[in-house]
Image (tube, grey):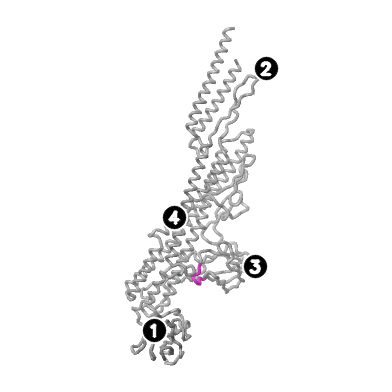
Amino acid sequence: MADLAGIALSGLRASQTSLSTTSLNIVNVDTEGYSRQKTGLATRVPQSYGGSFIGQGVDVASISRVSNQYVVDQLRRDVASYNTYDAYYEYAVRVDQLLGDDSTAITPSLQSFFDAMQDVSNDPASIPSRQVLLSTGEALVNRFNAVYEQVFQTNETLNIELDAVASKITQLAASIASYNESIQAVYTNNTGELPNDLLDQRDEAVRQLSELVGVEVLQQQNLSVSVFVGSGQPLVIGNDSFSVETVSNSSGLRRKDLIITDGTNVQNITNLVSGGRLGGLISVREELIDPVFNELGRMALSISQSFNDQHQLGMDLDNQIGGLFFSDINSPTAQFSRISADVTNTGNASISVTIDDTNLLTTQDYRLRYDAGTGNYTLYNADNTVNATFADPGAGGTFTTADGFTLNFISGAPVGGDEFKVLPTRQGAYEMDMDITNVRQIAAALPVNTNLPATNTGGGYVENVVVSDTTTADFTTTPFALVPSYRVEFTSGTTYDVIDAGTNAVVVGGVAFTPGQSNGLLELAGLYPASGYDVVFNGSPGTGDIVEIGYNNGGVNDNRNALLLGELASTKTIANNTVTFQGAYGQLVSGVGTRTNDASVSQEAAQTILNQSEAQWESISGVNLDEEAANLIRFQQSYQASARVIQVSSELFDTIISSL
């Protein structure tokens, strides 16, 4: 009878343990990362009795967690993928709304500005129209500045988040290393028994880590795990963990780089890490924020330069040659803001960047490196291909690139390995400003006027006046006068002389003229472009006909330069004459919108895949309350049955005792 009681007691203990395991599963149904556990039972070794074997009961062989490592690894990868797209989409939507919303976009302000320019061309002497033009110019500048500031603040927010993510990664790495140590200690001290709860907690820490950055996890024989990021950089090795930190970018940009360190060795992993929120943030910076900075900057530089160039060819209400309308894109401050020396440089070379032709500018950043062995500088494109290689021009020298800008070597000398970040367009929108302050300074007229005396007998007419340079001696020697002023006299229907109107001397004689087509009178005479202007004449002039050319004093109702300024709205002045201002902004908005839409599609797809992985994990490791409730009843009944066996055993024992 003792054997019967022993068997029943073993059943009680087995049922009680199973009930405890089931209860643990039930109460942890909402615990993040908890894997359901199950009790493993094994029959005790039977005893030999009378040639037969009599069972001795049951033992609890194990309490194991239900887990599939393949599913756990897949879930981790899907978590990292989803968080990459989620971070990218979050920032992309922010930038897309900034650029596309009428209340913040550049397009409405640009359209209003050129509408105001059209009003000035309709009535060039109107002070109210000129005031509106100045006001809309200020609004356009403010809009560029404001959009830049919003993108800048987005970049700052991203930097702050990088700090937080790096700190969280370091904390989780330390936790995983601590779990490794605890798991090894428990496993060693308990002769191979698995610490289920610690394993769950470590898996959950690794899962949380994968939300932040893509990781590779290697299982070790001692139950510890090694965690790697990037291209194999160790984050956790056994009981040791490394720190991920942010540092200010050495190029001088307001951005954070990522380094991994064990306190002595430091490695920059910015361009190595991928996956997780961290990978998404870095992609946002490289694929969205930097291009937007550069696209906006190129557009602002192009508007400023093209408008200034044409405005300086005109004449204002006070008969003065037009000045700058927008601020000088090549101010000393702007030139030095376009290049930044690496903080690790040991040389003292001082370099600035001058914009030569905004039409040739790209939207990429460049890297300039000096090689002491060859004595050459190498300019690298954003994709690290070589743009140009040239000998060090030395202090006071320059190098003009094919991309619309010149490197000015101001002073000092480089040391081998010195690097510089060249940013021709990045701050263009930030530095854009108004230079003109007085409505009378708007140069709506052209400074050259022509007159055809009434005594002319032919059918010739002035088709156009071209002004290309108002800094020549013709304009600057004497204010409000052309020096010299010319008079064109036709000696026949096909020839003419150019006369100095002040001295009546023939400057160039016998110039051939082709009736019925456009003829640049000064160009054909060899006086243009040195003169800075030309008169295009057409038709059939008569012998003795005269064209008088002079300074346009009092031309307050002249709108010729205003019309040329207005035409800039539809002129392709960006990207090698392939796109207009509005077109460039449209491409920027379209590009950001496309990337935002792609991110949205990718995020939704990643969410679907993640949901499937989570469902698969739940089906294997998750707690099913219905199943656990059934187990609870089954183990309760088993417990009660074992108790009944003990009762029967006691009754049998009492019967034996009473019969003695």
CB within 8 Å, label 4 to label 2: no
Q: Nearer the viewer, mark 1 or mark 3?
A: 1
The three-letter amino acid code for the residue at tag 3 is: Ala
Quarter containing the N terminus: top right
- Which residue is denoted by mark 1 in the rendering? 539
Give the secondary structure at mark 2.
loop
Tell me how far mark 4 sits from mark 2, CA to CA: 83 Å
Q: Which mark is residue 51?
A: 2
| Mark 1 → mark 3, Cα distance in angstroms | 64 Å
Note whether residue 486 is visible: yes
Q: Quadrant of residue 407?
A: bottom right
Q: Which mark is residue 94?
A: 4
Q: Do the numbered discs 1 and 3 sit on residues whose CB atoms are within 8 Å?
A: no
Labels 3 and 4: the sequence-earlier one = 4
Label 2 crowd bin: few (<14), some (14–19), many (20+), radius 10 Å: few
Label 3 vs label 4: CA separation? Answer: 45 Å
Q: Position of residue 520 (x, y in %)?
A: 44, 83
Please say whether residue 149 is one of the residues in the magenta stretch.
Answer: no
How packed mark 1 is, by other alpha carbons closer than 10 Å (few <14, some 14-19, many 20 or more), is some
Quadrant of the snapshot with the C terminus? top right
Q: Which mark is residue 372?
A: 3
